Image (tube, rainbow, N blue to C red):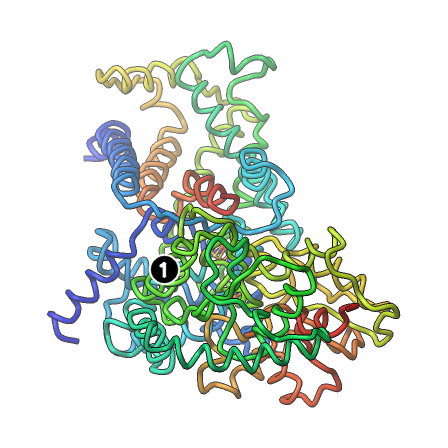
Amino acid sequence: MWNDIYYFIMVPMVYIAFATFALGILFKFAVVAFSPGIKGKLGAYPRRLPRPLGVVKEAFAVPVAFRKSKVFWFFIVAYHLSFALLVIGHLELIDEFAALQVIPHQVFLGAGWVGIVLMVSTLYFLFRRFRYPYNAISVPEDYLILILLFFALFFGSHMNLASRHLDFMFDVSKMRDYLQSLIALRPVLPEDIVSSYHNIMLALHVLFANLFLMLFPFGKMVHSVFAFCTLNLKRK
Amino acid sequence: MEKEKIRELKSLIASRLTRPMRYYLDTCTRCGLCYDTCHAYYGIPKKEYSPVGRAEVVRRAVKKHFRPSGRLFPYWGDATALDERVMDEMKEAAFSCTGCRRCMMYCPFGIDMPYILGIAKVLLIGYGNAPEELVMLADAAVEKGKSIDEFKEGFLSVIGDMELEVQKRLGLPSADGLIPMEKKNADVLFVGLSGAHSIIHPAVIFNAAKENWTLSFFEAVNFGMFAGDPEKMQFIADRVVNEAKALGVKEVVIVECGTAYRIPKFLLGPLPFKVTSIVEKIHQYLAENRIRMKDGAIAEPLTYHDPCQLGRNAGVFDEPREILARLASDYREMSPTREYNWCCGGGGGLVALDNEEFRIKSGKAKKDQIDATGAKIVVSACENCILQLNTIKDGYGLDVEVRSLSELVAERLAV
Ligand code: SF4
Ligand code: SF4
């Protein structure tokens, strides 16, 4: 039975998670696309930079948060930067991309720090929510998404760190076989993965990442896309 | 609440689910950066008066009725069905918000809280629970728009008295035509308010600048917007738009009233004429030397309160300051200022409601700011702000004089 559960998490559930994620995001976009626009403008002032530049600055440098809380700002920036590296790292677990190796590095990039920074930031976001006044405005899904993310990071990071510092080899080529087979819709779970010391860690990592992906389109995580739309409205 | 009523209210929500609304509803991460940025929260630190606290009231109902996740797993998102209690919360949230959008300056996504509260306001109208005062005032304005001919005679008779006052102020030999009405192809159509002062001071300035202008029959204030009724808002605004088109004017100049300016300037879409605030017009006259100020500036310490709709919501920050630089020798800036300046607590039609105690409390941020400047004169450029600043002054016993910018300019014109 354990084998079945293991297989379910590693193969069918990954498909279910990606399908939910993709269809959910498509659904979100479709709803927005079919909603009426407005004839007026909702912008605010001042606008020290022209629109596209200003939007990019506000989205990536988050000066608004910097003004209000330096600590929160630090974690916001650290988190989002590391998240971008995390995405690159995972792409490289699928295949070699020459473009991603402009600065040559070992796969998984970041020498283990990407996961650590993300975990610490996620814990900061989570514990911040337990404090007044943030607990007063938080709803259960705010905690849930952070907890899922934390566990996905915890188990993923564990494997990465273990492969670096212990005598356990995390075999990138086996991961590539596995992930490429998923993409090719001819899924195989290489025996080396199933029988590796970290098979449970990997399954837990995939489980929590699946859950995180499935929730992504249905909550506030869509701010990752819509933030650009709202910031654009602010300057229109 | 009966099912039929809920269905009706749901269709009202649906009518407001525009593209921006969907972005605003979905993007908030409940980060709390806006939490303490509302003047109402500053005066009364309750979650209900925090910007995100207000928006959540709306967001929870939208989630429950419009989102599969809210229907299937209401607990996780705190989705709440519409009922009497929720409607009360909506009223509290919507009609304690002045629409100042100060919170937007502190939101990393620039979420427009008053826009979200637009849903609460249409729901309250549909539920029959919107503030009566605002609804009645909006209805009266609509009525005037429908039967303007009946109002014309009475209006023209009071104009005569105002012209005499303008004549006296400018020391002119005749009062005739000092406040022109229905003048075709004028360069400027000026839209005032119901109070005579809102017409007399600008009329003095227009005449001093030898402007080719005419006065609108309507008041600039838009109670349809304050009540949150999109149709009435449009109708009330269209009265002036149609008048301007019929007269063929080049520019519509709006009295010192922030919302009245923001609506035609930004919310109606493209118009065949320019929309300007009287503050910008005065600034232009001074820059072109069409009007001059008397010698000898005001020596008492003076400060300026940025009306939210004129400042952060329309970008008119420098003009009033440059005008005041010519009028006062001891100008003191409030802190924080410009886009971060605190709202006085009078906008959004709140000064028209029976809520003085609340407005005094929610005006505490402004009171503290004025105190810190040590100013003896507080100037602003919005009728609502002036009324509320006086409420704050009386409520806290401040030793200051509250003045409107155009009044001060008209008074100190070199004629
Ligand atoms: S718009 Fe102004 S009054 Fe309304 S919630 Fe934001 S800060 Fe408060
Ligand atoms: S600052 Fe913006 S994102 Fe954060 S809680 Fe307030 S409205 Fe939501």
In the rendering, at what x and y percent does residue B288 appear?
73, 51
Q: Quadrant of the N terminus of chain A?
A: top left
**Residue A231, position as x, y percentages in the image:** 50, 44
Task: Answer with left or right where residue B195 lies relative to residue B149.
Answer: right
User: Residue at point 27% right, 66% down?
Assistant: B80
Are there few (<14), some (14-19), or many (20+) residues within 10 Å of tag 1?
Answer: some
| Residue A182 position by quadrant | top left
Q: Residue at x 54, y 40 (%)?
A: A59
Above/below status of A109 relative to B56: above
Query: The residue under label 1 is which amino acid type?
Result: Asp
Q: In this view of the protein, can residue A39 be seen by the observer? A: yes
B220 up-or-down from B151: above or below = above
Q: Secondary structure at mark 1?
A: helix
Q: Is residue A198 above or below residue B184?
A: above
State whether label 1 is within 8 Å of ligand 1. Answer: no
Q: Tell me the residue that label 1 is attached to.
A: B238
Total residue callouts: 1
Q: Is residue B40 left or right of residue B349?
A: right
Depth check, front residue: A37 or A196: A37
Q: Toward the viewer: A189 or B33?
A: B33
Q: Residue B210 location in percent, x, y?
A: 66, 59
Q: Is residue B304 left or right of residue B78?
A: right
Work out whether residue A120 or residue B165 is closer to the camera in this orientation and state it.
Answer: B165
Host chain of mark 1: B
